[in-house]
Image (cartoon, rainbow, N blue to C red):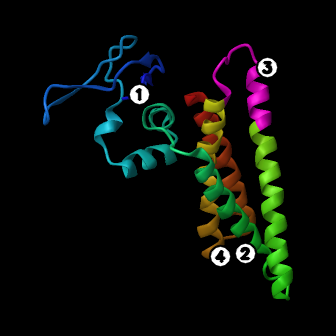
Amino acid sequence: MKASYACIHCGEKQQQLYKSYGPDLLKLSRCSGCNRVVDEYIEMEFSIVLIDAVLQKLEAYRHIIFNVGMGRPWKIALLFLLGEALEHWMSRQQTHKAGYDLEWHFYIICLFLIASNAVFIAAVILLTRLSARCLCDWTLLARAVILGSYGKLLALPANLWGCDRFQSQLFLATFFLFSQVQACRGA
């Protein structure tokens, strides 16, 4: 069991999410700060948690960041990066003709996105460090920024379904901004 969890409602550190009274009996722990159940999401399917994250519920973000963990965040970041690169590549595919040009263009897009995402994560960490209000761990904040980037994957279906590019980019940029704010608030 992890050494430290967090209440999804108030963010206070907790030692356990539940108490085991036998092989079939578990009781959810109560938060010492707000006296609510520490994390009721542990009883739910992950798809419900993802739906709540899409609905921008702070509790869902805290559940993923603190109580479930993200495993290896670089794998998730790579998935988001490749999805974003594929979306950029597909949107530019009509302007290029030769296959080798498209392939090199994809690699250039990947390098650009790696650099831009690294700068974005560093800027968020630096700006939150400079503010006196946030003294959280930088690795935790980097994981939150990576988690908040899941909205970039929504660009793929928007491109595949032929949505108006300007409207979909405006919606996705707004969604990305809200996701980043909620994820950083959760951390």
- Quadrant position of residue 186: top right
Nearer mark to the viewer, of 4 and 2:
2
Is 127 within the magenta? yes
**Who's the residue at 81% across and 64% down the image?**
109
Q: Which circle's residue, 1 or 4, is located before the other in the chain?
A: 1
Kind of residue at badge 4: Gly
Q: Position of residue 94 (x, y in %)?
A: 80, 83
Q: Are marks 4 and 2 in contact (CB under 8 Å)?
A: no
Badge 3 is on which residue?
130
Distance Cα–Cα, label 1 vs label 3:
30 Å
Can you identify the residue that label 4 sits on? 162
Name the residue tied to disc 2.
90
Report crowding for label 3: few under 14, some 14 to 19, many 20 or more residues within 10 A (C-alpha): few
- Using the numbered discs, state the Cα–Cα distance from disc 4 to disc 2 in whole angstroms: 11 Å
Quadrant placement of the N terminus: top left
Q: Residues within 10 Å of mark 1 (few under 14, many from 20)?
A: few
Q: Quadrant of residue 155?
A: bottom right
Q: Nearer the viewer, mark 2 or mark 1?
A: 1
Of callouts 1 and 3, the N-terminal one? 1
Which residue is under mark 1?
Answer: 2
* Circles 2, 1 touching at the beta carbon (< 8 Å): no
Q: Which residues are magenta?
A: 122-138
Q: Position of residue 101 (x, y in %)?
A: 86, 81
Task: Specify whether 57 is left or right of 111.
Answer: left
In the image, is 81 to the left or to the right of 59? right
Upstream in the sequence, badge 3 or badge 4?
A: 3
- Image coordinates of residue 48 in percent, x first then y, are 37, 48
